[in-house]
Image (spheres, helix red, strand yellow):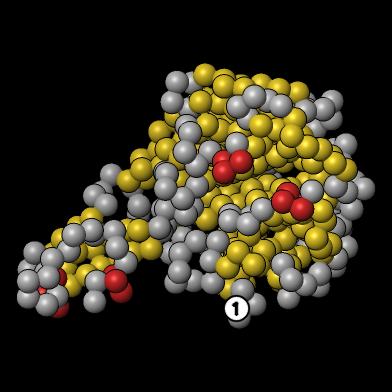
């Protein structure tokens, strides 16, 4: 059954090439890292630019919010990591992190840690509470490490995508990968984790124009998505909706059903190549970065978020990309459902 996705554009911003986008967890802000060396912060509610500052005169390939510190952290082609206070634009700290271009930054969700990856084929772990000490170097890739992402279900593990055609899964406590996923025919540009509790899945996209879904417990490819006409540059399991988003240098963003892997829709806004896609738990917004600027779309659904089978006595609803249900007839007499968003197993 199709999802009948209702897609609205919330923000369209023309700019230099956007290499990375991020969404703020509490402010209506989108962060854009630009090939020109600048960083933009856009307010997608009033369509205004909140901040515009020059990081360096070389491309900024990654930029991330650290909301608990009021920081923006950037990584650029001068091998530097820079930390800015996004309220004052004061530079808090900077250091040379790698011996080649910095491709990606991943922020640990709770600890004072960041991961960085680079064309020097390394991933490094940094602790900002220990004077930005490098706590570990992860070695094993044999080509540029294009993206790194923490596992939302286990923050001590992360995945990396490399042009050596592999995805590797690592533990923070070991500098050697737990295992390697092989199957792409060309370099892997992007990787993401499935957020729901029911499937131990990773997604990857590569220059072979394929998107692959992996079961990282069984270490097998469970699905290959085909249809893009150029390199895959961005992949994303949406944390709230049962969809997968894939972006390509063919200029399109494709939206797939995360349960059936059926193609739901293809978006082309005429902004040339897609470089980055970002979504966030708690919102239906999706940020997209292109050669010619950035766009925020809101992905809604026309059908209700909850439905009730009167005769069967069941309530069914969607929560964090998973379908959940409760049988009212099975509830003890006198017990009522105060919050339908509580997980099913909490009701008993």
Q: Is residue 254 left or right of residue 274?
A: left
Q: Residue, x 17% and y 72% (percent of image)? A: 327
- Res 318 → quadrant: bottom left
Compared with 96, 328 (above or below) is below
Q: Residue, x 54% and y 72% (percent of image)? A: 200
In the rendered image, is residue 71 in sight? yes
Q: Secondary structure at mark 1?
A: loop
Q: Which residue is mark 1?
A: 217
Give the crowd class for mark 1: few <14, some 14-19, many >=20 residues within 10 Å.
Answer: few
- In percent of width and height, residue 115 lies at 73, 54
Q: Is residue 74 left or right of residue 58?
A: left
Q: Residue, x 85% and y 47% (percent of image)? A: 97
Compared with 44, 4 (above or below) is below
Residue 302 or residue 21, whichever sits in front: 21
Which quarter of the image is occupied by the C terminus? bottom left
Question: Which residue occupies the extreme front position in the image?
Answer: 130
In the rendered image, is residue 263 in sight? no
Which quarter of the image is occupied by the N terminus? bottom left
Compared with 157, 109 (above or below) is above
- In percent of width and height, residue 25 lies at 50, 42
- In percent of width and height, residue 234 lies at 64, 48
Q: Is residue 148 left or right of residue 199?
A: right
Q: Residue, x 70% and y 39% (percent of image)? A: 73
Question: Which residue occupies the extreme bottom position in the image?
Answer: 218
Compared with 177, 69 (above or below) is above
For the image, the number of numbered tags is 1
- Res 223 → quadrant: bottom right
Residue 175 or residue 110, whichever sits in front: 110
- In percent of width and height, residue 145 lies at 80, 55
- Res 191 → quadrant: bottom right
């Amino acid at each position: 059954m199709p999802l009948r996705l209702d897609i609205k554009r919330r923000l369209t911003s023309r700019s230099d090439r956007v290499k990375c986008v991020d969404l703020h967890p509490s402010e209506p802000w989108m962060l854009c890292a630009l090939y020109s060396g600048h960083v933009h912060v856009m307010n997608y509610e009033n369509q205004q630019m909140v901040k515009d500052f020059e990081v360096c005169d070389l491309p900024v390939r990654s930029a991330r919010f650290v909301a608990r510190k009021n920081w923006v952290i950037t990584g650029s082609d001068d091998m530097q990591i820079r930390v800015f206070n996004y309220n004052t634009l004061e530079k808090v700290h900077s250091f040379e992190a790698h011996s080649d271009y910095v491709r990606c930054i991943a922020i640990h969700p709770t600890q004072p840690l960041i991961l960085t990856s680079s064309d020097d084929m390394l991933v490094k772990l940094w602790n900002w509470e220990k004077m930005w000490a490098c706590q570990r170097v992860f070695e094993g890739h044999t080509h540029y490490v294009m993206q790194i992402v923490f596992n939302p279900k286990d923050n001590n593990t992360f995945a990396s995508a490399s042009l050596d055609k592999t995805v590797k899964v690592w533990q923070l406590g070991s500098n050697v990968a737990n295992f390697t996923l092989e199957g792409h025919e060309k370099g892997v540009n992007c990787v993401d984790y499935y957020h729901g509790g029911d499937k131990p899945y990773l997604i990857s996209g590569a220059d072979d124009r394929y998107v692959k879904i992996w079961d990282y417990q069984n270490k097998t490819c469970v699905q290959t998505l085909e249809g893009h006409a150029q390199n895959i540059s961005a992949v994303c399991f949406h944390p709230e909706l049962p969809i997968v988003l894939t972006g390509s240098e063919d200029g399109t963003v494709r939206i797939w059903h995360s349960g059936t892997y059926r193609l739901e829709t293809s978006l082309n806004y005429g902004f040339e190549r897609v470089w980055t896609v970002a979504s966030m738990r708690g919102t239906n917004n999706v940020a997209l970065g292109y050669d010619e600027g950035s766009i925020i779309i809101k992905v809604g659904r026309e059908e209700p978020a909850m439905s009730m089978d009167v005769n069967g006595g069941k309530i069914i609803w969607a929560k964090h990309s998973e379908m959940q249900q409760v049988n009212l007839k099975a509830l003890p007499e006198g017990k009522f459902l105060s919050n339908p968003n509580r997980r099913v197993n909490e009701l008993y």
